[in-house]
Amino acid sequence: MRKPWFDDEKALAAVEARGVDRRDFLKICSTFAAAMGLSQVPFAAGVAQAVEGAAAKPPVIWMEGLDCAGCSISFSGSLNPPAASVLLDSISLRYHEALMAASGHQAEAAFHDTIEAGGHVLIVEGAVPTADPRYCMIGGKSFEENLKAAAEKCAAIICVGACSSFGGVTGSMVCGGVGVSEIIKDKPIIKLSTCPVHPEHLIGTVLYFLATGEVPELDEHGRPVAFFGTNIHDNCRRRGHYDAGRFVTDWNDPAQKDYCLVTKGCKGPMTNSDCPVRLWNDRTNFCIDCGCGCHGCASPTFYEKMSPIFM
Ligand code: SF4
């Protein structure tokens, strides 16, 4: 549905002024529109408007619990296309412990003012510590207390990475990390569960939400079907070798270079994600094409149940 305040030319000109080439901008929007099933929405009124045309930019709070900050790095390091900068220009990022300039009382005020006003999108990176409330304590409050306060009036929660989605690596440690959905039960929760988050998964999800005001179709684990609806094994370029029974048994044998890695611990058959198609690092490569078996990082049972990673 076309919004009255949207102007295609103005939107494109504004993005161009930020150094993003018009062709790249249209490519970014088309890619995300197709990936998220937005093709039925008129282009300009859908994704492009979400990127640049909205009069009021939705407030976003980005919290970090038990994590390595890898999702923040993955997201902010997206270079080509400069999707992260396009997205950061289309939302109002009020609070992010690593990226925000403010600190101390100013940062606290930004957090509390935003959650008090409500209607924000809450992005959570990292798991909720359950072993000790002192882990990830900020402003004298435990992470769980801050999370509950931030979730109370939010429009939706986006979990970035395996830790906030399902506990991830921290779930198998003494800190007792659990996914956000173990704590928050009454809000729509979208899980982008690769470790770290794929920048395009995050951007596509936010754009979908901005364009439609709705949560995208999710699978039984709360992950967008558009990104997690296919199995890695089904799209793997080594699949022919798997079917033919050619497996890597010796890392040092050049003849086995492209063989199937299931004998070396590949978790592709039990993992759903579009990694083989979307690729990583600006569409350069992904784990299996590098010669490393899939770790199953997008799976709800990662990390503990995916061990050993290598055999
Ligand atoms: Fe399947 Fe992994 Fe073998 Fe690829 S390398 S065919 S995902 S088992």
Image (spheres, grey):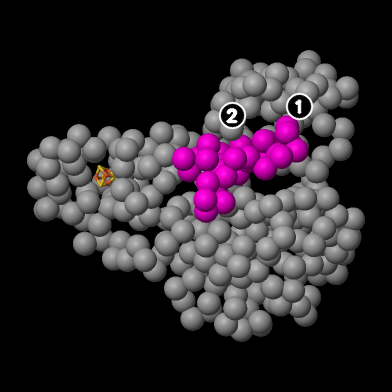
The numbered dot on residue 309 is none
Relative to 97, does residue 21 appear above or below in the rendering? above
Instruction: Give the quarter the ligand 1 occupies.
Output: top left
Relative to 133, does residue 198 appear above or below in the rendering? above
User: Which residue range is magenta in the image?
Assistant: 200-229
- Give residue 189's position: percent from left, percent from top: 65, 54
Q: Residue at x 42, y 46 (%)?
A: 272
Q: Secondary structure at mark 1?
A: helix
Relative to 138, does residue 15 appear above or below in the rendering? above
Q: Which of these two is toward me, 126 or 86?
A: 126
81 is within the stretch colored magenta: no
Q: Which residue is mark 1?
A: 49
Assess disc 1: are there few (<14), some (14-19) or many (≥20) residues with their C-alpha within 10 Å of its C-alpha: many
Q: Which residue is mark 2?
A: 37
Q: Is residue 248 left or right of residue 114?
A: left
Judge: label 2 CB < 8 Å from ligand 1: no
- Give residue 184's position: percent from left, percent from top: 68, 65
| Type of the residue with mark 1 | Gln
